[in-house]
Image (spheres, rainbow, N blue to C red):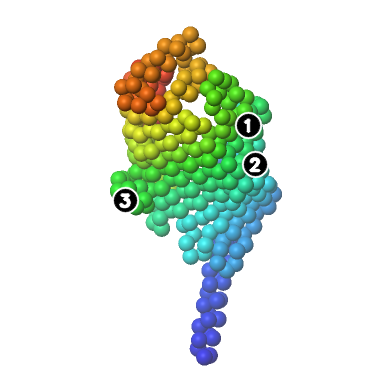
Amino acid sequence: MRKLLFLLILGAVIWSGYWFVGSSAVRQGAERWFADQSARGMTAERTDLSVAGFPNRFDLTVEGLKLADPQTGTGWQAPFAQVFAMTWKPWHIIAALPPTQVVTLADQDIALASVGMRASLRTKPASDLPLAAVIVESGAFTATSTKGWTMGAAQAVASINADEEIEGAGDAPNAYVIALDIADLAPDPATMARLTVGSGLPATVSIIRTLATATLTAPLDRRAGEARPNLAALALTETLITWGDLSVTASGTIAPDADGFAAGRIEISVANWERLVPVLVASGVVKPELSQTVQNMLGALALDSGDPAVLIVPLVLSDGRMSLGPLPLGPAPLLTPPNG
């Protein structure tokens, strides 16, 4: 009995020592990070920094946060931020963000109000700390800009998972599965009022769901800042947008061409596509005088698909341009700098 008691006391002492050494390392690492940012000319301020969670967690709390890059004019302010890690797996951290934050861009400030916004980062326990998964989620949130626009959603979840972490996804090198799920997206009311004129569509997009696999030129790990991974290919497995009775699904593959522009083909299916034409006109993609021509053209394409209510058309990206079937849309997105 005495031996057991001795072992328990010894184990408690060793574990306590591990926690105090680990918590000291966490605190010093955080202090060093703030000092390094200031030395680089960044604004990196906080009013308090503490570590708690004994004996099973390292809970880092930073209060009065103000981070900014004076050169770009970007920054972030928050009353606090918390980072949690279990003592036995410090490679998995969870961050809890406050209900109010302010993001500063070069031309505007954006106030964020959210419920339960948090993020999870998990790396693999290896020397290069390769990324295993990142998950960012929030309950109801709103964003309000000093430029006058607002937007919000009832719920949002975004994630990036190393391909081998997904069951049945395969084991492609430097491949990451990207998922996005947004419920009841409410874009800026003034913008939506303009876009939905004559379409009969509501001001809220009820579902936005995307699943894709991005293949990069280098892995996402602690050396990514040196390797600078670029996009080698993007395979869109599933996209679903439900906006009133307008429903859009899409799948396909794109990759940067030699000039860095997106190139490839994405097959798009639009149910109740007639709702889309007024939106294209209101957004400036289609000139008002051409709306009936576009309506007739898309109607003919829908008849070819076998169901006049469903439009099946490819989004083609080639030579720096993109088109939706026979309808030109303009320049293709620039995915990478020219020649990588």
Question: x, y percentage for residue 224?
Answer: 41, 43
241 or 265, nearer to the observer: 241
Q: Image check: 122 left or right of 201?
A: left
Between the residue at mark 1 and the residue at mark 2, the CA separation in whole angstroms equals: 11 Å
Question: x, y percentage for residue 238?
Answer: 38, 38
Is any atom of residue 337 visible in this view? no
Q: What residue type is labelled 3?
A: Gly
Q: Counting residues from the N terminus, which is met first, the one under dot 1 or under dot 2?
A: 2
Say which residue label 2 marks.
113
Residue at image coords 52%, 62%: 86
Q: Which amino acid does label 1 sit on?
A: Thr
155 up-or-down from 70: above or below: below
Q: In which quarter of the image is residue 193?
A: top right
Say which residue label 1 marks.
150
Quarter of the image with the C terminus is: top left
Between the residue at mark 3 and the residue at mark 1, the CA separation in whole angstroms equals: 40 Å
Badge 2 element = strand
Q: Image check: 158 left or right of 339?
A: right
